Image (cartoon, helix red, strand yellow):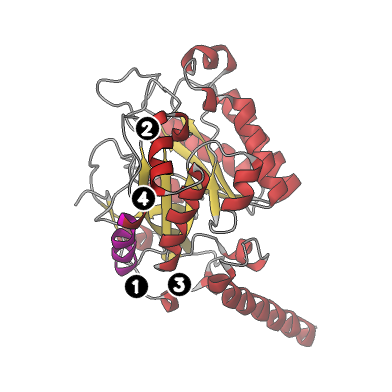
Amino acid sequence: MSSGYIITPKDTDTDIQVLTEDDSNVVTYSLASPFTVTRLCRNECPYCSFRRRDTLVVPYSTIKSAKHARQLGAREGVYVSGERPDKYNNVRSLLDLWGFSSYLDYLYTVCELGFLEGLIPSLEVGFLSPVEMKKMLEVCAINKIMLDSIDPNQAEKFYEKSPGKKLELRVKSLHWAGKLKFPTTTGIIIGMGESKSHRKEMLHTIADIHKEYGTIHEVILQNFVPQSGLHQAKGPASKADMLSAVENALNILPEDVSVTVPLHLNLPWIDDILRAGVRDLGRVYTPENPSYCAPHPPAVYNIDEIAESMGLRLQQRFTLKKSFIKNGMYSKKLGQIFDAYRYKIKKESSEKTKEVRVAS
């Protein structure tokens, strides 16, 4: 099994118990399936194994995969691409051949096809302009904008050929998403040679953005995993580094921002991560369609058993967690799924308020 974990998937909406997500003994996760639309990327990061010469997938070819993902119990479809593949002539020619007016039009169509099969789309495509974000917000629940930051004295050389990795551009994108009320996943990579003070600075930046807009859905602490044949920074992230980063994140970030650590990047310390206070596992990928970015098949960990031994209970959630559903942070289109749950959440809150008044 190449997924790196064992979690019993859910196969019906009724198995997703939104109301109990914030119970103290619950550890949530979103069962997801990635759809890589192209690996072409304008950035040339020295540690990346994702980027390669490629073309776009045929939009309708994703329908079968989306159907299968739903059969496996996934509710999130993660639509992934290299950044701005439309800078390449072959991609623009293909878009024109297929009748798409733009790369954005293509992305929207692919995400909508997944939505029609019951998946809730999320984006991981790199830079989008505010106008493009606004359009994709109609069909996507979350936009992922990682900071991928290292200390300034190293960044210029390290990301010399990666214009989309500039920290000021990534931070600006988080502000754009905030103003649009687009729920956002962000985070930092641990173990690339960054200083501890730089990590804290990035976490404070994220915290400030969430306090201003309330749109940071989760913060990923991504353990850097060196890959054979590529230029490496310091890495790999040690257990001590990861636990230190988790502690800092939990202390610095607002309480309503989830802190997650990817399971698919060979993380053998999940029990320590849970003991440190992490209560959301983020995206857990379907076993037959593991994450596009796992460097090689990791060992298998039975997360259910680990959590149970600690008195915790795993619970599948939607792409959006309870608090974002409660606050209506989704589009009219996605309301076809979320509106009923928002009503249940508000009803539960009203009933609890009445109970408190009666008791007093």
Check disc 1 and report its element: helix, strand or loop: loop
- Label located before the other in sequence (1 or 4): 1
Residue assigned mark 2: 90
- Label located before the other in sequence (2 or 3): 3
| Mark 3 crowdedness (10 Å alpha carbons): few <14, some 14-19, many ≥20 | some
Magenta region's main secondary structure?
Answer: helix
Q: Is residue 22 above or below residue 191?
A: below
Residue assigned mark 1: 11
Check disc 4 and report its element: helix, strand or loop: strand
Position in image of residue 345 (x %, y %): 62, 75
Disc sitting over residue 16 in the figure: 3
Q: Which residues are magenta?
A: 61-71
How far is disc 2 from disc 3 in space, using C-alphas? Answer: 42 Å
Q: Quadrant of the C terminus?
A: bottom right
Q: Amino acid at mark 3?
A: Ile
Determine the residue positioned at 43% across, 36% down: 92
Q: Is residue 293 above or below residue 141?
A: above
Q: Can the viewer see residue 343 in this picture?
A: yes
**Which numbered disc, 4 or 2, marks the residue closer to the eye?**
2
The residue nearer to you, when weighing 164 against 155, is 164
Residue assigned mark 4: 35
How far is disc 1 from disc 4 in space, using C-alphas? Answer: 19 Å
How far is disc 4 from disc 2 in space, using C-alphas? Answer: 20 Å
How far is disc 2 from disc 1 in space, using C-alphas? Answer: 39 Å
- Label located before the other in sequence (1 or 3): 1
Position in image of residue 34 (x %, y %): 36, 51
